[in-house]
Image (cartoon, rainbow, N blue to C red):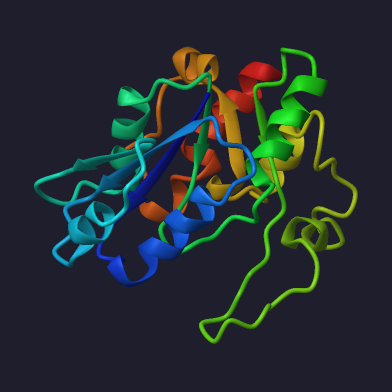
Amino acid sequence: MISIILPTYNRSALLRRSIDSILCQTWKDYELIVVDDGSTDPTREVVGCIDDKRLRYLSFPEQRGAAAARNAGIEISKGDWIAFQDSDDEWLPEKLERQVEAFRELPKEYGLVYTGFIMVSRSGQRMKRTSSIAQLADRAPFSKLTLQGDIHFSLLRGNFITTQTVMARRECFNLVGDFDERLPASRIGIYGSGFRIITSSH
């Protein structure tokens, strides 16, 4: 089973679309844990309107930050794999299924897989026609770096993995620990915990 951790703060207008993109996944064996980081908008009501037994809701009395919200979700999760979604993002329908397939084809020492992503403007227009990761590969300092397999040294030059594209084995978090809650929001993604996973898997 996959545990999907979705932290949110005051994004009730966007949250339903994010959740619906999870509920529409072709891979059905998962739990979705929405962690409300002290929202003051109708986030609770949005989640409460969704009738799905796979959905769990955890609410903080006050804001603690996305790293703390993700850690709280991991702590109560039950899945063998852990994936992350953000409340202003949407997944394509086969995202989880393709990542499970990738894990099944890879040796067990691979602890994390990630996908490309497409940036969309507020008006709904695609800002990039191809994966942003592929575009990064064509730019210095990424042009001569590896973006799959052993990516340790590539990540030392700069981050090209966004949290909502990641799926990791649970044992990786048991090994390296959770997201670092001391880091600012802009740094809690792959560097918050994923880089330690990659280093340990290397």
Residue 178, quarter of the rendered image: top left
- The residue positioned 34% from the left and 48% from the top of the image is 7
Q: Is 173 left or right of 26, judged from the image as shown?
A: left
- The residue positioned 83% from the left and 55% from the top of the image is 137
Give residue 132's position: percent from left, percent from top: 73, 62
* Viewer-closest of 73 and 140: 73
Pick out the residue farthest to the front.
51
Q: Is 198 left or right of 147, judged from the image as shown?
A: left
179, above or below 62, in the image: above
Give residue 22's position: percent from left, percent from top: 51, 49
- The residue positioned 62% from the left and 37% from the top of the image is 27
116, above or below 35, in the image: below
Pick out the residue farthest to the bottom.
123
Q: Is 20 left or right of 49, judged from the image as shown?
A: right
* Viewer-closest of 25 and 103: 25
Give residue 169's position: percent from left, percent from top: 58, 21
Q: Is 16 left or right of 126, judged from the image as shown?
A: left
- The residue positioned 52% from the left and 14% from the top of the image is 171
Residue 145, quarter of the rendered image: top right
Give residue 162's position: percent from left, percent from top: 58, 50
